[in-house]
Amino acid sequence: MRRSLWLTRLGHFFFGYRDYLIPFTFLVLSVTTVPEFPFGSERLDHWLDVVGLVIAGIGQVLRIGVIGFAYIKRGGRNKQIAADTLVREGFFAHSRNPLYLGNFLIIFGLILIANNRWWYFLALPSFLLIYTAIIAAEEDFLAKRFGQEYEEYCRQVNRLIPSFTGLRQSLDPFTFAWKRVIQKEYGSTFTWTSTALFLLIWERWQRFGYAEQSAQIHTLAWGFPILGTLYLVARWMKKTGRLGGL
């Protein structure tokens, strides 16, 4: 019980700063570490970049699917956990925390791209702790807020790993809401894709130097204005009401 209370309190703290933890941690690690070739193999390192991007992409697709079919709102005033209703529809009928699973897949993909032992030993366990604590805090809140209904939900649905049995039937009643996806995801998508571009440039610059990799670095750098433009367009659409309400 003491450990659970400690983890819950830690989760409430992390919840308030969850949007800043990933870029801040990656920035610190990129300044204090250098990328490494896995087992001394440059070819294997290229494949790790590809695998990392694929895994991060799967995490993003999962988040898009979850938000597009059934949106869940957990943030209240002053960055505190809140919930008006207990969402059990869509992907939430198969996993209680599919969005956090998507987040972790994105983080794991970025760590594979960076490929440094300290990222594996420090960043990966740190983010496991952060999300474990946040989930514990949310579960504590939801158990108090919804009581027996939430306990029944916990018995029926896994905490994290989804069950795909009956997923199509769960999604059939919903119409996919692209506008909601853009409204809710443009910021986080911009953050992780920009981070991925930065890491790809960082590892080339650190390992080979700018002169040798200038062509690849310039090609990758073009991604930043493209991502920035997409971000600004999405933000403009949101601020002008073109994406509608939630």
Image (cartoon, helix red, strand yellow):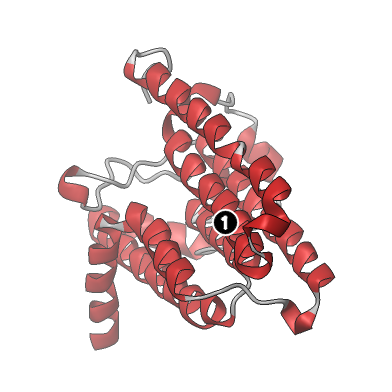
Q: Can see residue 164?
A: no
Displayed quadrant of residue 2 = bottom left
Give coordinates of residue 60: x percent, y percent: 59, 46
Q: Is residue 115 above or below residue 55?
A: below
83 vs 215, left or right, is left
Q: Secondary structure at mark 1?
A: helix
Q: Which is more toward the observer, 1 or 215?
A: 215
43 vs 82, left or right, is right
Around disc 1, counting alpha carbons within 10 Å, would you say few (fewer than 14), some (14 to 19), or many (20 or more)?
many
Q: Residue at x 34, y 63 (%)?
A: 139
**Residue type marked 1:** Ile
Quadrant of the frame with the N terminus: bottom left
Q: Residue at x 49, y 40 (%)?
A: 190
Q: Residue furthest left?
A: 78
Q: Residue at x 43, y 38 (%)?
A: 187
Q: Is residue 95 above or below residue 186?
A: below
Give coordinates of residue 73: x percent, y percent: 35, 41
Displayed quadrant of residue 175 = top right
Q: Residue furthest bottom?
A: 2
Quadrant of the frame with the C terminus: top left
